[in-house]
Amino acid sequence: MDMNYLTTLKLHINGEYRPVVFATHHTLLEVLREECGLTGTKHGCELGECGTCTILVDGRPVLSCLVLAADMEGKRIETVEGMQHGNELHPLQAAFADLGAAQCGYCTPGILMTAKALIAENPKPRPAEISEALAGNLCRCTGYHKIVEGVEWAAAKMRGEEGTPPEKVFYGSPVPDPHPPAPLSRPLPPPSPGEGGDR
Amino acid sequence: MLRLPQFRYIRARSLAEAGAVLTGEGAAEGEIVRLVAGGTDLWPNLKRRNQKAQTVVSVMSIPGLSGIHANGEVRIGATTLLDDVARHPAVRQRFPAFATAVHSISSPPLRNMGTIGGNLCVDTRCTYYNQTEEWRRSIDYCMKEEGTICWVATSSPRCWAHTASDSAPMACALGARARLVSAQGERAIPVENLFRDDGIDYLAKRPDEILTDLLLPVEAASDRCGTAFWKLRRRGSIDFAVLSAAAALWTDPAGAITRARLYLGAVSSAPLAVPEAESLLVGKTPTPDLLAEAAKLARKAATPMDNTDFQTQWRGAMVQRYTEAALREAAGLPVERLAPKHELFGGVTTAAPSPLSG
Amino acid sequence: MANPLRKPEPEPQREPNIIGKPFRRVDGRAKVTGATRFADDLAFPRMCFARLVRSTVPHAIIVSIDFSEAEKVPGYLGALTGEEVPIPFGILPVSQDEHALCPDRVRFVGDPVVAVAAVTEDAAYEAALRVKIEYAPLPTISSVEEALATPEPRIHDYGDHGNIHKVVSMTFGEVEKGFAEADEIFEDVFFYEGNTHLPMEQHSAVAVPEDDDRVTLYSSTQTPHYVHRALSKVLELPASRIRVVACSNGGGFGGKSDPFNHEIVVAKLALKLGRPVKITLSREEVFYCHRGRHPVLMAVKTGIKKDGTITAQRLRTALDGGAYGSYGVASTYYTGALQTVTYKLPAYEFQGVRAFTNKPPCGPKRGHGTPQPRFGFEVHLDKIAVALGKNPADLRLGMLAEPDTVTANWLKIGSMGLRQCIEAVVAGSGFRERWGQLPEGRGLGLACGSYLCGAGLPIYWNHMPQSGVMLKLDRSGGVAVFCGESEIGQGSDSILAAVVAEVLGVALGDIRLCVADTDLTPVDLGSYSSRVTLMVGNAALQAAERARELIAQAVSQQLEVPQSRLVFAERRVFDAEEPDKGLTFQDAVIATEARFGTLATTGSYIPPRSPGRYRGAGVGPSPAYSYTASVVEVEVDPLTGLWNPVHVWIAHDVGKSLNPVLVLGQVEGSVYMGLGEVMMEEQAFRRLPRHLSNALVHKHPSILEYKSPTFLDMPPVTTYLIEDPDPQGPFGAKEVGQGPLLPIMPAVANAIWDAVGVRVDQVPIHPHMVLRALEAKTKGHEPRFGPKRFPDVDFGENLIVPTPEQGGDGKAINDYKETLRAGMRSASGTMMSREEALKKKKLGALTT
Ligand SMILES: Cc1cc2nc3c(=O)[nH]c(=O)nc-3n(C[C@H](O)[C@H](O)[C@H](O)COP(=O)(O)OP(=O)(O)OC[C@H]3O[C@@H](n4cnc5c(N)ncnc54)[C@H](O)[C@@H]3O)c2cc1C
Ligand code: SF4
Ligand code: FES
Ligand code: FES
């Protein structure tokens, strides 16, 4: 390869400096996975359309498939590999593992990074805010609810709150009495099941 | 993985340096030199080989090009990140519909990368064009790049790719100006003059001109000015607009409309003004019937083509519905039935609580 | 050594320790730390990269291929053409119609023609762009109607006739009599657009050559065993020289269950170049691999009595199959097979046709062939309920199929929890009180569904187990579990580990899994057809029970406690009557190893034989059926036709939740995917004006334009898990991966009717369709949007199969080929080799 098209940089990844030489037109996604061996960051489109490759740069979620590694001088890069403390999982990681928020696990690194940035900014996010923050990350397995629950629970843990998620998160909703009271004489107003109701 | 082609990459440290590369030797010899800011439009285009470049100049390291300055008018530096624009208190308070428009762009991580300058200059879109090199080979390309025919309208002499920017129609409606700098000097032009109604040559600026600022005028921040931005798209996030309506209505103390600006996005190659509707509105009190009438004119003016999501005819019908909703919101009238759908499909309503208003 | 096949002594009853509990999945930690190695995460010394050059024309003869420009790309290593891999393959023995690279003809835009290899992926891509291929175009076919009208030129020179790949037609019971006895006849036509799996992970494969005739393939595949077979066939190497390792899949949903071109290509290239070769498909290419939901046009006719009893049903389906067979023959049968397991259908006629078209091949997607007719059936029932003035819930409750019965088409139903499912969602949503009562623009819809827990027959005819599990225990106290099953996100690793740990009373941490490796693990047919929990679970159960039996014998002798009193729990083996008297599990294994020598046990699973004996009876039978009911609430804006789901209630009869968290995840994931299908997902194609171009292309092979719901598009979901244990399932468990998707689409369509009084008889339900139907309603026309008619198809003579009620024996009475087929079908187990069968062109043994 033509030397004019190579870049040498000291990247700051997960708190460590790492000298890397790479083709200048390579994205951060490619450099992380191929030059640094950090394959925890995944990809699903390489065009900015799926969110799978999300990492943090200076604390903000960005899509590593549309970032040049050459632009990373002096930036703080965080990937999923840097989440755990020693051998201990980050509360988000633990919550995702326990609540089934990771099925195939392919979207998981990107979602974990986005969620980490969200909690840093908003330690007590409401479910709607979690969905809003994660709206650029597609997942095909979970149907999203377990992820929202996982973020909520992890945020609570990080705030130092005790306790476990409600039973239905683990066992489903209690099966209702199949014989409800006799039909009402006049129609009920439509309920608003979204609020405070089941997720 | 879909990858970028090889190119020479220059991180300009000053406007002069960037300008020098744009007009430099390479460019003179026919090399393609392109500017990049956040890259969320350019990189996908290069990866799909929609656009080509031997040299790419980044404007992201040019000092002073990023940031929001609010004194009277609000000046937004071209490389300011979309998320920073949408969250900025001055923008949110004085130009809530503009904050809404910017907040509706793409997805949260993309708004941490894309810039306002890049958004105004974003390439036009078309489902025959935003495809990989191999796919475009299978239709023998089209007029916008390499080919000769426009597949959207096969006898058309022009390309109908649609404007994709969400900030542009709103900036136009507000009467914003854009500042352009080149080796030849600088000029500030009304934003609407930045665009041309042509899917290929969609910008009216010279290639060596760099967009440095967007200036949002004081008049549009006044209490007498109501604004609204309505965007139609399939999903709550990620998607480009398949239609947007941006409205600004100025009223006198008696409630009569003194000035009206209405722009539509995604239904032509540039943000589309609807002067017929504007002149219908001026001098009258904004009654529901009047606004509905104006919305009909908007529908007439728009030419949605079959080059994006949703059925074309239906999108035409929606031009009227969305314009009416935007006008009603700008006029302070209630927007009834559409509201919940708008929240879901646009994710950007100012009526319902959103992170922006909260 | 003791006979491990001796029937195990029953263990004293104890509460399960793991089964039924929401434990952390065994691969959970790796998945949240980024440690899971997906195929594209692998790298080997000297690894190079391949890229496929795919056809840019929909149907053509290949005239010439020119590599001269490609060869100039720095880093170019070589190429592979169809001539070097001439042997056809395919997932079903009856449709071996694919080539790793097209030898002479391309059949759709995306069909791979050549492969190039280079030192870097950049270079491979550049080289691929520079390969010049000249084509001589052929006429194209883009729909079933066109295929029927255009028998020549044929896309394939096999199939039932012209461009019709497969025609099936059968009658169970006296259908015409049933219609005659009915009080009312209802007829409907429905259309279900094709859609695709869109797994977040793009397919990837790495081949590593070893020795001069050995190769290992790491791949994101749901079916390593079938890939193994295809590789052996095409590479012309004994299967023993090929090792296939399925990496964890980043989502599959059926999209990674065929052997694929790229897998064979890298294996061949690795052997040719003598170095590891990786290929990772681009997102666009994933759309070309497809194998997703068939577009299906359906006509359903039902005779019904005033009291809501169905007297007969006739279903016709027309499947747009795409350019290759894939699972298509099975898919065709599946569009008719499972109509009978939810509601009583005393007489049933099914006619289906699958056409070849110049589009990416369709195949199995979550629900394989059944969501389309299920959509039709459930919307049809809703219309019937309205016409009869009945509540849709009551209509269904009144006609439920009975547990432990055999259906008209000879499927054996075991446990059947649909009644509880319906009652749960009806009560939870307030359906009885609120249906038909909500204000304009709001509506509720109910629908049900049922799915297989694994197919009764394997894809290729054989008498071997469908699942095998092997355990190795030693003095470490750890248990190594070997099984060919592949983890695609559904949690199969966790189920395997949990079953073994439960039986042996050890912790999940004591289990070490080795899965999906054709060299090291016993065959499991793969992660498809919702078969893993039931089949792998049963095989694991058997292997673990055999190990427990050996350990119990040894411990019983050592402790002098009768074997029947020994309990395996808490990582100990102890006397139920004197719990302090016992050994740690490790000591117990030591005692056993000392007594019997090196310890290993195996378990196998072969599904029970189904009673159906007619041609086509192989598709539909399953050891058990899961059941689901759902109510969806929607809001619809009558001004725009925009609608959105507001809430979903869903109840799924899973038999027994082995891990409820995983079960909930599958239910919610299915709801999501079903909503995606009905709201927005479509694998759509476009032609250009014919006088200007021969193009026939995928409209939008990108993850941006193929719409799939985001976080913001997903409504709240209330999930009820119904447990009606099935004796065929391990601990009573049934499937949950696919069934819960089925009721979602029809429930939405029914809810839209409840909201604004119009029917959209088609999926997805775009807003313009709702609006058009509303406009029709305003004008006093039929308030409906949907297909008008089913095409005229010559289905030939129906197979006539008397039902169990008629005293049938499971056989057709008019199958003239039956005698010839008897060899293949006989209970004695004699069978023809595939070659023989092919020779005789009696290609019937197929299923998934
Ligand atoms: C999945 C996806 C979804 C998207 N959705 C939306 C959406 O909903 N709405 C929307 O509006 N956009 C959308 N975009 C497009 C894009 O992300 C935004 O428009 C973004 O604001 C572009 O800014 P950028 O800085 O990244 O532009 P770049 O890619 O850096 O540049 C875009 C173009 O502008 C030129 N340019 C950039 N800066 C300057 C300057 N200062 N002076 C002169 N020329 C300049 C570049 O040469 C280039 O041609 C989407 C993109 C993706 C990938
Ligand atoms: S509008 Fe026509 S010319 Fe323009 S990009 Fe689309 S197909 Fe090409
Ligand atoms: S890989 Fe899809 S957004 Fe980056
Ligand atoms: S867990 Fe599989 S894509 Fe999200």
Image (cartoon, coloured by chain):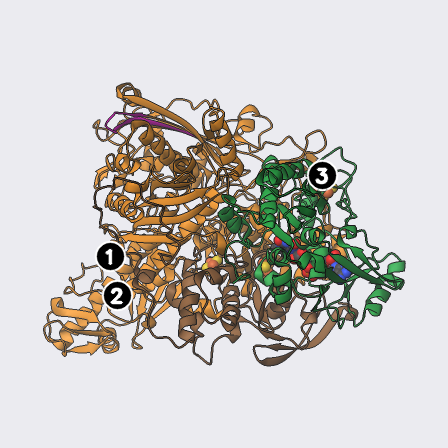
Disc ID at residue C502: 2
- Respond whether the residues carrying marks 3 and 1 are from the same subunit: no
Label 2 crowding class (10 Å Cα cut-off): few <14, some 14-19, many 20+? many
Real-space Cα separation, disc 3 to disc 1, in angstroms? 72 Å
Q: Disc 2 vs disc 1: Cβ atoms closer than 8 Å?
A: yes
Q: Disc 3 vs disc 1: Cβ atoms closer than 8 Å?
A: no
**Quick check: C152 above or below A107?**
above
Q: Which residue sits furthest front?
A: B254
The chain coloured brown is A
Label 3 crowding class (10 Å Cα cut-off): few <14, some 14-19, many 20+? some
Q: Which residue is mark 1?
A: C731
Hue used for the chain lettered B:
green
Identify which residue, B155 or C228, lies in the foreground.
Answer: B155
Identify which residue, C415 or C520, lies in the foreground.
Answer: C415
Residue C685, by quadrant, is: top right
Please give the chain letter of the residue carrying mark 2: C
The three-letter code of the residue at mark 2 reads: Glu
Real-space Cα separation, disc 2 to disc 1, in angstroms? 10 Å
